[in-house]
Amino acid sequence: MPATFTRTYTASPAHIDELGHVNNTVWVQWIQDMATAHWDSVARPEDRAAFFWVVVRHEIDYRGNVSEGAEVHAETWIEGPAQGAKSLRRVEFTDSAGKRLVSAATTWAMLDRATGRLARVRPEVLAPFFED
């Protein structure tokens, strides 16, 4: 079972677009921030030193939005085993009432820091992201 990572974001004036709510590019940034923070907080030190991740695909469903000053709760997890050098991550954002606002499935590819080339994701690299 995947272990989840959570964080809360507050919509600041810089996040708001001409429609008066959080801009889609901000949601994408928050999705990437969640993935990076989760990796940094859970991955083994030797894996953080040896590898880094790049996005190869974002699939995002926008079901709602929030205005300036509103808080959103974000939750992320790794979904299933890796496929070669790729891993699927889910991110969900909900408002204070628990309504799902944004759902994302992002595919990340792992690269070797020394070579800059794709690296096969071994099970032990993702093991810390799953509960026993």
Image (tube, rainbow, N blue to C red):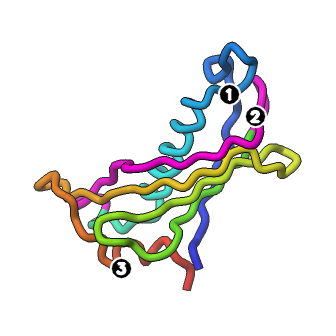
* Residue 65 within the segment the image draws in magenta: yes
Regarding residue 22, the answer to whether it shows in the image is yes
In this view, the mark in front (3 or 2): 2
- Tag 3: residue type? Pro
Name the residue: 48% across, 47% down. Answer: 58
Q: Is residue 16 above or below residue 26?
A: above
Q: Nearer the viewer, residue 61 or 126?
A: 61
- Tag 2: residue type? Asn
Q: Earlier in the sequence, mark 1 or mark 3?
A: 1
Q: Which residue is mark 3?
A: 123
Q: Quadrant of residue 63?
A: top right
Name the residue: 12% across, 55% down. Answer: 114
Q: Residues within 10 Å of mark 2 (few under 14, many from 20)?
A: some
* Residue 23 within the segment the image draws in magenta: no
Q: Which residue is mark 1?
A: 22
Q: How many marks?
A: 3
- Tag 1: residue type? Val
Q: Earlier in the sequence, mark 3 or mark 2?
A: 2
Distance in Å between CA atoms under marks 2 and 1: 7 Å
Q: Is residue 110 above or below residue 93?
A: below
Quadrant, the N terminus: bottom right
Q: Quadrant of residue 123?
A: bottom left
Q: Earlier in the sequence, mark 2 or mark 1?
A: 1
Disc 2 secondary structure class: loop
The boundaries of the magenta stretch are 48-71
